[in-house]
Amino acid sequence: MEKIGFVGVGLMGHGMASNLMAAGHPLTVVAHRNRGPVDDLVSRGATEAADLAELARASDIVHICAPGSPQVEAVVDVLLANMAKGGVIVDCSTSNPVSTEKLAQSAETAGIDWVDAPLGGTPAQAATGELAAMVGADEDVFARVEPVIGTWAKAIVRIGGPGSGHKMKLLNNFLAMGYGAIYAEALALAEKSGVGTAMFDSVIRGSRMDCGFYQTFMGYAVEGNREAHKFTLTNALKDMAYLAAMADGSGVANPVQGAVKNSYAMAVNTGGDGPEDYVPHLVDFVAKVNGIDG
């Protein structure tokens, strides 16, 4: 069995790492700020490395779940200096494809294979092994890692070579964050015009305009469930900034994306920058800007 290293056993990573262990893979983890998930995994048989270098030397395949490209770049620098040739790095973060393609080239030079495998799904799906993975990897590398990814993902699609998984994930998140921005503005207008949130939802829910993202977003707007969709406003803004860089690199005009990014920038820069300020809470910031109470 491939020996797995896991960097970032947080909301998503803990469930993924648990499934890797359940499938019989020896697992090495490293602590960051939150010891709870690390202690849990160690209690069930994982090995805790003292640092990233030790984790790299102990692993055939290293998974990374980090907030964004700066953190991924710092981790990869250490991995490339310490992993044995023939190892594989699997970046499950939502990263900037411009950075990803450079990291993949550096990995190739070091004799390490690269996979970007950003995630689709929720922490609950991570725990049950039912995530989606959008994979960027060479075909032979994909053949090696697909069974490993299959321990934590139910839907696995190889998009193309290195970097393509992150490009697809940003397109996916553009749609999701775009929905969120539209819903927040529509609800503000519903309240201001006298239609109201409850009536708006009664018409949209179950119609052609309904979808899974709508239901999780409205889980907060209608039901007040603050944890209906646990994806932060800061991550939404970060992803839209990465998408802008991707569009610039492709020479594509993306005015809608600019408007979506600005919606999240408004929220983050007016108090929505906390670790528990999630995407559906955008509705509160849009309401505040428009003078709507509650």
Image: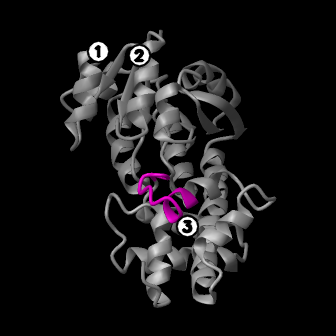
The amino acid type found where label 1 is placed reads Arg
Q: Is residue 21 left or right of residue 290?
A: left
Q: Is residue 274 above or below residue 227?
A: below
Gap between marks 1 and 3 measured at Cα: 38 Å
Residue 80 appears anywhere in the view: yes
Q: Is residue 194 above or below residue 79?
A: below
Q: Residues within 10 Å of mark 2 (few under 14, many from 20)?
A: some
Please report the bounds of the magenta region as a residue range: 218-230
| SS assignment at label 3 | helix
Gap between marks 2 and 3 measured at Cα: 34 Å
The amino acid type found where label 2 is placed reads Met
Gap between marks 2 and 1 measured at Cα: 9 Å
Closer to the camera in the image, 143 or 224: 224
Residue 84 appears anywhere in the view: no
Closer to the camera in the image, 53 or 24: 24
Report the quarter where the C terminus lies: bottom left
Label placed on residue 240: 3
Earlier sequence position, callout 1 versus callout 3: 1
Name the residue: 62% across, 42% down: 162
Mark 2 lies on residue: 21
Name the residue: 62% across, 23% down: 146
Of badges 1 and 3, the one in the foreground is 1
| SS assignment at label 2 | helix
Quick check: is 91 in the magenta stretch?
Answer: no
Closer to the camera in the image, 98 or 274: 274
Earlier sequence position, callout 2 versus callout 3: 2
Mark 1 lies on residue: 44
Counting labels gives 3
